[in-house]
Amino acid sequence: MSTTASSVPPPPPGAAMPTTEASALLGAGAAAPRVVGPEPASPVRGILLMLATGLLFSMMDTLSKEMTRHYPVLQVIWARYFFHMLIMLAALSRMRPWLALLHSRRPGLQLGRSLAVVLSSALFVGGIKFIPLADATAVNFVAPLLVTALSVPLLGEKVGLRRWTAVAIGFLSVLIVIRPGPGMVHWAVLLPLAGAVCYALYQITTRMLAGIDPWPTTALYSGVVGVVGTSLLVPFAWRDPDWTGWLAFVGLGVLGSASHLLLIRAFALAPASTLSPFGYVQLVWAILAGIVVFGDVPDVWTLSGAALIAGSGLYVLLRESHLRRTGRL
């Protein structure tokens, strides 16, 4: 999940967002606007688009991992943000002068949120340079469980015994994947874990911003902070790309933008409660990409841990959906 990071749903930053679960998979700083005008319900098409979204996110992560074999991690992160931002600015330019969109009623919180998602992306890509995609993605999917845990002290929300149990199982499952001690997969597995913490904080601050700033402002802040921050640092790690390198860097931006657009369309066609569980199929895409592209066949511990993490996350998601429907959340 990248977070880009790629992978797990943050709550929407305001009324113009689809749903709490919806923006979930928006990854590196983009937020999905609600589609203007009535949309005919089409759950099957929405599910297919959600599956395609996960595939594109996994393709972006796969390309990022390949690029870290030839270029510094910082340069790969810069490319992800820079070319994605160019495409996003082209889309936002129709709305109003994009600089005006940077006006926020909570600039400090917007900055903190943006730094959290940039760090999440950097830590995830730094991790996949050394470890298989399956391991990194599985560990990264602990983020929704961290959101549930952190929502108690940071948002004052109440979490019942069932969800706490699922959170505890998910955390223990991370240990199965990481296997701390002499049999540890690789020290770099801690990077996507730290990235999951950053991504959870990103989701929490996104929820804090709900109703304060419009979605273009929230989305643009993430992109601007990512581009400016990485552009200031990347000269110290720059390696001149050849034409294939530039093509791959542009591809990162295209894949990120396309996945966000498909996600927005998916949530316009079907409710979040229907689509969100299919976000975990990205784990399957990551496993397949690791096997086909890099020859990384996950062992039984990684598969078991990934299944338990996904199961715990799904339980929390479905439980919260049930509580929301019954008015108890």
Image: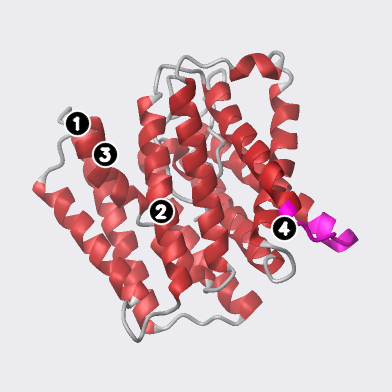
Dot 2: within a 10 Å radius of its alpha carbon, few (fewer than 14), some, or many (20 or more) residues? many
Residue at 83% across, 55% down: 246
Tell me, for residue 196, which label it has, or none.
2
Secondary structure beneath label 2: helix
Look at the numbered discs 2 and 4 and tell me whether their residues touch, using CB distance below 8 Å: no
Camera-side mark, 3 or 4: 4
Dot 4: within a 10 Å radius of its alpha carbon, few (fewer than 14), some, or many (20 or more) residues? few
Q: Marks 3 and 2, Cα distance to the nearest angstrom? A: 22 Å
Residue at 56% across, 62% down: 126
Please name the residue that numbered disc 3 is placed on: 321
Among the two numbered marks 1 and 2 on one chain, the one whose residue lies closer to the N terminus: 1
In this orientation, which residue lies closer to the viewer: 191 or 257?
191
Among the two numbered marks 3 and 1 on one chain, the one whose residue lies closer to the N terminus: 1
In this image, 239 relative to 177: left or right? right
Tell me, for residue 237, which label it has, or none.
4
Q: Report the amino acid beneath label 3.
A: Ser
Please name the residue that numbered disc 1 is placed on: 156
Q: Report the amino acid beneath label 4.
A: Ala
Q: What stretch is highlighted in magenta?
A: 236-248
Look at the numbered discs 1 and 2 and tell me whether their residues touch, using CB distance below 8 Å: no
